[in-house]
Amino acid sequence: MPGRSFDASNSRNALAPPPDSAEHLWCLRKAGSQIECELRFDHESASWECLCFYNGQRAFRRRFQTRTGAFAEAAQQRDQLKREGWTDESSRRRERLWPFGNSHGVPPSGT
């Protein structure tokens, strides 16, 4: 409403991202396939979505009242997929960046 200020202090989604924005969380690979996960805020329903895409096609979507709930679901999905043999793209990237590692053949910590 023009001329009125909005007090977001009591809004559970006060720090909601702009419409149509997505937060990419992770990417896993296995046998030439890829699964990506992202969080989105749905302004119409004022809820957060955890979305997973299998080779670019949406394969999973679940809504939550809070970002924390959506993030927890994403972590559970990732953990389950890793138990099934999917590998983390960031760990693969580290292996390419540090092919020789240190004297023990291990990449430096924090990379």
Image (spheres, rainbow, N blue to C red):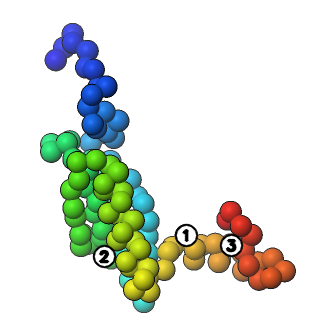
Q: Position of residue 60 (x, y in %)?
A: 23, 69
Is residue 47 found left or right of 16 in the rendered image? left
For the residue carrying disc 2, how many other residues have a C-alpha within 10 Å: few (<14), some (14-19), or many (20+)? some
Quadrant in the rendering for residue 107? bottom right
Q: Could you tell me the amino acid type at mark 1?
A: Ser
**Residue, disc 1:** 90
The residue nearer to you, when weighing 50 against 32, is 50
Q: Residue at x 35, y 35 (%)?
A: 15
The residue nearer to you, when weighing 57 against 75, is 75
C-alpha distance separating marks 3 and 1: 10 Å
Please report whichever mark, 1 or 2, sits nearer to the chain's N-terminal start: 2
Label 3 sits on a secondary structure element that is helix
Is residue 104 found left or right of 40 in the rendered image? right
**Residue, disc 2:** 54
Work out whether residue 30 can be spotted: no
Q: Could you tell me the amino acid type at mark 3?
A: Leu
Quadrant in the rendering for residue 39? bottom left
Q: Position of residue 30 (x, y in %)?
A: 43, 85
Please report whichever mark, 3 or 1, sits nearer to the chain's N-terminal start: 1
**Residue, disc 3:** 97
C-alpha distance separating marks 1 and 2: 18 Å
C-alpha distance separating marks 3 and 2: 26 Å
Q: Residue at x 31, y 25 (%)?
A: 9
**From this viewpoint, which residue is outermost toward the right?**
103
Q: Could you tell me the amino acid type at mark 2?
A: Tyr
Q: Residue at x 32, y 63 (%)?
A: 73
Is residue 62 found left or right of 16 in the rendered image? left
Look at the picture and state if 90 lies above or below 19.
Answer: below
